[in-house]
Image (cartoon, helix red, strand yellow):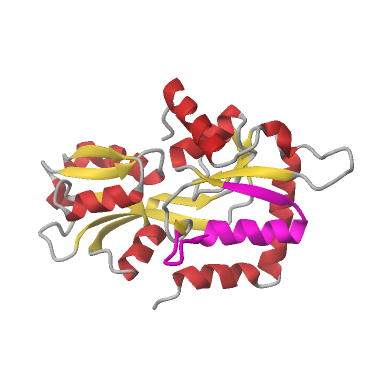
Amino acid sequence: MKKFLSIALASVMALSLAACGGAAPESSDSTASGSEKKYIIATDTTFAPFEFTDENGDFVGIDVDILDAVAEDQGFEYDLQPLGFDAAVAALESGQADGTIAGMSITDERKEKYDFSTAYYDSYVCVAAKAGGDVKSLDDLKGKKVAAKTGTMGSDCAYALQEQYGYEIVDFADSDMMYQDVLTGNTAACFEDQPVMAYNISQGNGMEIIAEQKEDYSTPYGFAVLKDQNTELLEMFNTGLQNIIDNGTYDEIVAKYTATK
């Protein structure tokens, strides 16, 4: 469930945009000469395989490549701002970003504030613990602490199941810190989107999935704009997405980051 952000966070986020060279919303407008629009798109910092920095220092991932392919197909330019999930949403709500692509779950609550694209990926929540440890199921979490990333479906799931399984929740701003907390034993397990956890396990992060919540916490990801704004951008994203699905580019992108190594 999306949490309300403080004014201080919005201020810090604004400074972050300035430091990254982000432009004001007016920069998205076409110039008098009729040049292409350039949109500011906010995203997460580390949410592999959807967005992350690879061994070469390049910012890559399913979201990153889909956005690039859609922009090329539709002929628009963009400035991608990796801000972190909460800050990316704050940028969208404050008008300092035109759109957000960050493994963002499409929910009824979010639809009250944002307009979403056609879903581009289906996900669900899983629970993971340190590989080879004593925690093998949700029942093993009673009386322990678990980790959850704020603003995500995993966090919603953790809070919904808290009373049933009797654990305490520790909130984190990003996935890497959450994983490290589990590996060091400060928390017994974490709630995460299954494709994200599966990818990180395949990369040797030292964790294992102990439970999956497919039925009640299955959710599609979508590209988002603020409600009733940037409809042209949203329409271009939907058109471009369908085009790259039809020509096979979409499947190539997903396979690139999810194929078993």
Q: Where 250 falls versus 94 (above or below)?
A: below
Which residue is rendered at x = 59% and y = 35% of the image?
114
The percent position of residue 41, horizontal first and vertical second, equals 61, 44
Which residue is rendered at x = 71% and y = 51% of the image?
77
Q: Is residue 108 found left or right of 77 in the rendered image?
A: left
Q: Is residue 65 magenta?
A: yes
Q: The C terminus lies in which quarter of the figure?
A: bottom left
Whether residue 109 can be seen here: no
> What's drawn in magenta, residue-wise?
53-80
Which residue is rendered at x = 70% and y = 52% of the image?
238
Which residue is rendered at x = 89% and y = 42% of the image?
33
Q: Is residue 115 found left or right of 243 in the rendered image?
A: left
The percent position of residue 97, horizontal first and vertical second, equals 61, 37
The residue closer to the viewer here, 136 or 132, is 132
Q: Is residue 251 magenta?
A: no
Q: Quadrant of residue 196?
A: bottom left
The percent position of residue 137, horizontal first and vertical second, equals 18, 56
Q: Where 128 falls versus 170 (above or below)?
A: below
The residue closer to the viewer here, 102 or 215, is 102
Q: Where 260 falls versus 195 (above or below)?
A: below
The residue closer to the viewer here, 217 or 14, is 14
Q: The N terminus lies in which quarter of the figure?
A: top left
Residue at far bottom of view: 261
Q: How many marks?
A: 0
